[in-house]
Image: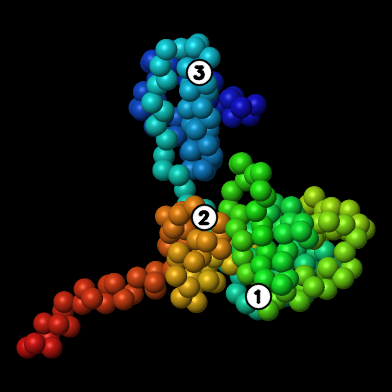
Amino acid sequence: MGSTGKPILQHFGAYTPEQITKAMCVEYKRKRYEAGKSQNTVWTELGHLRSAMNFAVDVQAIDRAPKIWRPAKPQPEIRVLNRGEARALIDGAHDPHIRLALVLLLGTGARIGAVLDLEWSRVDFERGIINLRIEDEQTRKGRAIVPMNNATRPALLAAKEAALSDYVIEYGGRRVKSIRTGFVNAVERSGIGHITIHGLRHTAAVTMLSAGIPIGKVAQVLGHSNTRVTETTYARYLPSHMQDAVDVLDFASLKAARA
């Protein structure tokens, strides 16, 4: 709330909670837009106000929290790499541990935290599976047990032979806590343009869906608790997956055929 609180207090600070209305929130949005702020910024700021009001109820500072209106949450823009760009990114990684991390991120659709947490005890070469889950985890999301493929298996086998620690992603025998610098360097060398680490998860998801993999299987690979999360995030990038559905609605051609 350090920075968010300044514009919030400037606009709402003179009012008691029960005086806050939707019209005030809409006016706040208008002023922030005039100040050059994005829809995402306004959505976040009003969300912090909502959280503050709910906290005030929890600590019994107020009896009831006002309803805080917010503009619609903006959909994030997702950059998806094609196969050539993904290959160029992997080739752009000079350090073995960065290269291995990229292979695993693209080959499993996992989040970076799951890859950096991965230990050799959860890599089963005999069964050909990678267990990205942590047995006692409570809050970590999107972790699955996925099969190895033709890229991840040889990369893991080579890394296992040279392993100096319990962690799959290591450097000098120590666990790696971040690959941000190595990732940025690989992106620059590859010449593929801007992409985030999380964008590799998007790339994996959209690539699977584009290849016709059922959304239920994609959800399992991504560790989503249900397919609704997968559909909400990725369906808008794949309008072709609804083609057979709208083809049934071709009433004009049906009429012409009968005529």
| Mark sitting earlier along the chain (3/1) | 3
**Residue 209 seen in the figure:** yes
Q: Under tag 3, what secondary structure?
A: helix
Residue at position x 61%, y 41% from top? Answer: 138
Q: Please say if 92 is above or below 47.
A: below
Residue occupied by mark 1: 149
Q: Is residue 154 above or below residue 228?
A: below
Residue at mark 2: 224
Question: Looking at the image, is mark 3 or mark 1 nearer the viewer?
Answer: 1
- The percent position of residue 221, horizontal first and vertical second, equals 56, 63
**Residue at the spot 50% in from the left edge and 61% down from the top edge:** 219
Mark pair 2, 1: CA separation: 20 Å
Q: Circle 1: is it few (<14), some (14-19), or many (20+) Cα within 10 Å? A: some
Residue type at the position of mark 1 = Asn
Report the residue marked by disc 3. 58
Query: Mark 3 Cα within 10 Å, few/some/many (few <14, many 20+)?
Result: few
- Within the image, what quadrant is residue 21 found in? top left
Say what amino acid the circle numbered 2 marks. His
**Local secondary structure at mark 2:** loop
Give me the residue at 45% from left, 30% from top: 28
